[in-house]
């Protein structure tokens, strides 16, 4: 096989321009490296989940206590200790670094840890974001502004296809596709994969998450491109089954769904295809895991029908409108919104309405007798003040006794995935045989630190931290080779 010619060579190539990719590019550039970013999407869609996320990272009050918290969250899926220490030290520098690139960093609300009972949670200082605003692309735009001010070259609509290696297995560049033709770029210091997760790859989701075509919350470009490139050169994988699922409201004809929140009234239950409840719908929930069966588990993990009544419909939007929470692909890219009274969504077919439970059961294709028994038992438990099936908190026991009745049928909506090519404390990708693949790095959602539970703002914090770590190491490697 003839090695393809290099169309252009730089010190560091970054594939993907979310938080991790931009942090890597800026860091490498500021350390004297020539940098090129290759972005799969057009400019107006670029940024992966960072573009549509809450844009917040957690405030790390104490690196050593934060390390304890990370170990606690990992539980029986421990993360390499060198990675833990690197994560703890570098996430504590996120706010200072964001300010150094010109961002106005402010606190978002008064949010405590989602797992306050775990050792180390006292290191969690809440959310930080640009201008103190949750979502609305604030953090992404600040990162892009810093990128543009440095004149770092970005090639949009240029997906990475294959990594180029030399005779000793070192990664020396990447083959991309531009207008149907192969273009090759060389990298003296290394290639940093920041391509996001694999939640938009149906086959990978089936294989690794045991879910069948779930709706998406974020970027549809997250198809596991970086995972495939890394595996092709022998990369090991870690925590590929870990992800964050959310109860969503699917949009007909779209791969995306709205976040189901029920902030204004807790009058809803979940039933399975047999019309019966199958879980406590309101457990203690973190960003991806909930405390059920005496331990933290992925939640939710099953297809469900979300049932509520007229009182809950009138109480307020079951999915927070954009003015309350400007996050997600549907709000920030497709410019959709949710009505205050949920009626527009009923008319659009997002929500099913029926005058009786029997009619609702027929519309959902569930046994009518079972659904009626389920609602009767639920209402009796609400009156008694105790959930006899799943011990749901008494302050959420709200009866469903005022028709018409409503339902949303959904699978768990995937917010993001966590697993990917295994990396070390320097962001270097590790081969299946345990050694570092020279010249290959990973940062962000493609290879997040989190083996199990994680708190709010952890993903962006991880991406910023390991983006900088990878950018610094790749630029150092380029300078050593020059």
Image (cartoon, rainbow, N blue to C red):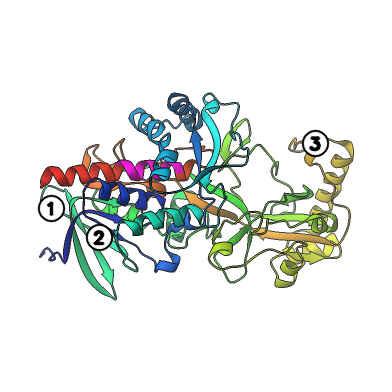
- Residue 98 falls left or right of residue 359: left
Q: How crowded is mark 3: few (under 14 residues within 10 Å), some or many (20 or more)?
A: few
Q: Which of 317 and 355 is in front in this view?
A: 317
Gap between marks 1 and 3 measured at Cα: 63 Å
The residue shown at (46%, 26%) is 62
Residue 162 shows which numbered tag? 2
Q: Is mark 1 on a helix, strand or loop?
A: loop
Main secondary-structure element of the magenta-colored stretch: helix
Disc 1 packing (10 Å; few <14; some 14–19; many ≥20): few
Precedes in sequence: disc 2 or disc 3: 2
The picture places residue 73, in percent across and down from the top left corner, at 50, 32
| Residue pointed to by mark 3 | 394
Q: Examine the structure image and report whether residue 468 is included in the region drawn in magenta.
A: yes
Q: Is residue 258 left or right of residue 361?
A: left
Count of marks, rendered view: 3
- Determine the residue positioned at 16% across, 67% down: 7
Q: Which mark is residue 166?
A: 1
Q: Which of 91 and 82 is in front in this view?
A: 91
């Amino acid at each position: 096989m003839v090695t393809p010619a290099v169309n252009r060579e730089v010190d560091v190539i970054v594939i993907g321009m979310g938080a991790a990719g931009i942090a890597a590019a800026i860091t490498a550039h500021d350390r004297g490296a020539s940098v090129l970013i290759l972005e799969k999407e057009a400019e107006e869609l670029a940024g992966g989940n960072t573009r549509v996320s809450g844009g917040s990272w957690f405030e790390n009050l104490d690196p050593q206590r934060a390390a304890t918290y990370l170990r606690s969250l990992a539980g029986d899926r421990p993360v390499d200790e060198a990675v833990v220490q690197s994560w703890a030290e570098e996430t504590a520098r996120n706010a200072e670094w964001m300010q150094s690139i010109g961002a106005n960093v402010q606190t978002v609300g008064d949010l405590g840890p989602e797992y306050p009972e775990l050792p180390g949670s006292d290191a969690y200082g809440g959310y930080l974001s640009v201008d103190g605003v949750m979502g609305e692309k604030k953090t992404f735009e600040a990162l892009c502004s810093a990128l543009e001010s440095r004149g770092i070259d970005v090639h949009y609509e240029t997906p990475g296809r294959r990594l180029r290696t030399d005779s000793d297995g070192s990664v020396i560049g990447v083959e991309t596709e531009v207008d149907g033709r192969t273009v090759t770029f060389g990298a003296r210091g290394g290639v940093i994969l920041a391509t996001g997760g694999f939640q938009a790859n149906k086959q990978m989701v089936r294989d690794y998450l045991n879910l069948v075509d779930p709706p998406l919350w974020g970027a549809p470009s997250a198809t596991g491109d970086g995972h495939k490139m890394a595996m092709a050169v022998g990369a090991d994988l870690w925590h590929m089954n870990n992800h964050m699922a959310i109860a969503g409201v699917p949009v007909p004809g779209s791969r995306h769904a709205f976040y189901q929140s029920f902030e204004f009234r807790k009058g809803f239950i979940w039933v399975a295809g047999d019309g019966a409840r199958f879980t406590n719908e309101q457990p203690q929930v973190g960003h991806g895991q909930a405390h059920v069966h005496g331990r933290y588990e992925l939640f939710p993990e099953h297809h469900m029908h979300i049932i509520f009544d007229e009182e809950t419909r009138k109480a307020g939007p079951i999915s927070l409108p954009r003015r309350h929470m400007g996050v997600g692909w549907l709000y920030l890219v497709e410019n959709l919104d949710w009505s205050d009274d949920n009626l527009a969504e009923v008319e659009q077919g997002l929500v099913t309405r029926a005058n009786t439970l029997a009619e609702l059961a027929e519309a959902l294709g569930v046994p009518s007798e079972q659904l009626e028994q389920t609602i009767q038992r639920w209402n009796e438990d609400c009156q008694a003040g105790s959930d006899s099936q799943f011990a749901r908190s008494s302050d959420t026991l709200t009866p469903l006794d005022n028709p018409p009745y409503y339902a949303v049928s959904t699978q768990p909506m995937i917010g993001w995935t966590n697993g990917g090519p295994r990396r070390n404390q320097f962001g270097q990708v590790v081969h299946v045989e345990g050694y570092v693949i020279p010249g290959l790095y990973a940062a962000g959602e493609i290879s997040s630190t989190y083996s199990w539970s994680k708190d709010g703002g952890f993903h962006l914090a991880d991406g910023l931290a390991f983006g900088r770590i990878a950018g610094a190491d790749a630029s150092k490697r380029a300078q050593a080779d020059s």
